[in-house]
Image: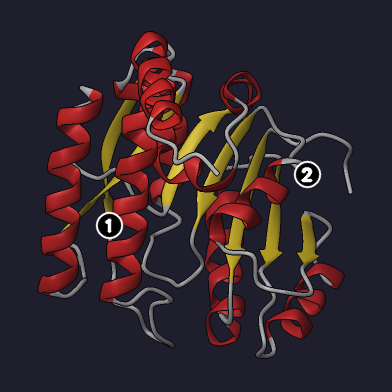
Amino acid sequence: MKSKAEISIVVPLYNEAKNLKEFYSELDGVISADGKDYEVIFVNDGSTDDSHKILLDIEENANCVKVLSLKKNIGKAGALELGFKMVSGDKVVIMDCDLQYDPRDIKSLLNKIDEGYDVVSGKRINRADSKRVKLTSWLFRFVVRKLSGLIFSDFFSGLTCFRVSVITHLGIYGNLNRIFSVYAYRAGFKVCEISVNHRIRKYGNSKYNFLSRLRLGLRDLIILFFTVVLTREELYKVGLVGFVKRPLI
């Protein structure tokens, strides 16, 4: 393994055994054709299928692959946080491995970074999702726009590229990864989104159902409200009110 790569691709996953070989084969074919010096960091988030075994086989036959397998499931945000600690590249790509994203779109994201952008997010066109998922996404997108001032069409894309210096500066952790572009924008970084393909899932099912998506969305909005919308003085007042109304014991 080379000590430093030009591009680090972080791939969080949970029970994606049926997709992994095809995903990596397609990804490697695309990136290798461009002659990029890259590394792929798979973060296996406590999978209970054969994902770990398949990843070890991929790692054994590819010197650009790193595998981190967690003993228990901690969620995508936590898996990404651990993956970020392993990157050596100056440019980082986050990508889901469910085959719904096209590795050929990575080149377009990297080109925008080379143009001077700090964060480039993939905007899914012709989304291969149910009407219910599209509806909830539209609703939360509308609210996030109003709260943040960032006019994006897709805040929760599974394909994003950014300079490693951005995440070093922001110190993003936990579920803040889900609205990464908002924090980068508010911190003064240059952000944009570009259209990317979104394909129908071939194997397995989404890890999120309607209720889990709703919970995540509501949590994102609460976090966004308290970390972006409220000023420090307003946040102090909210805390003071809570203290005054606290029942005496």
Contact flag, marks 1 and 2 (Cβ < 8 Å)? no
Side of 67 where 142 appears, left or right: left
Distance between the alpha carbons at the discs numbered 1 and 2: 28 Å
Give the answer, above or below, for where 229 lies relative to 48: above
Q: Residues within 10 Å of mark 2 (few under 14, many from 20)?
A: some
Name the residue type under label 2: Met
Residue at disc 2, secondary structure: loop
Most foreground residue, 195 or 27: 195
Please identify the quarter of the rendering in which residue 34 is found.
top right
Q: Residues within 10 Å of mark 1 (few under 14, many from 20)?
A: some
Label drawn at residue 86: 2
Regarding residue 202, the answer to whether it shows in the image is: yes
Comes first in the chain, label 1 or label 2: 2
Most foreground residue, 78 or 197: 78
Residue at disc 1, secondary structure: strand
Regarding residue 112, the answer to whether it shows in the image is: no
Q: Which residue is mark 1?
A: 197
| Label 1 vs label 2, nearer the camera | 2
Side of 99 where 138 appears, left or right: left
Most foreground residue, 245 or 117: 245
Percent x, y of residue 140? 19, 49
Percent x, y of residue 215? 33, 62
- Residue in the picture at 77% in, 35% down: 88
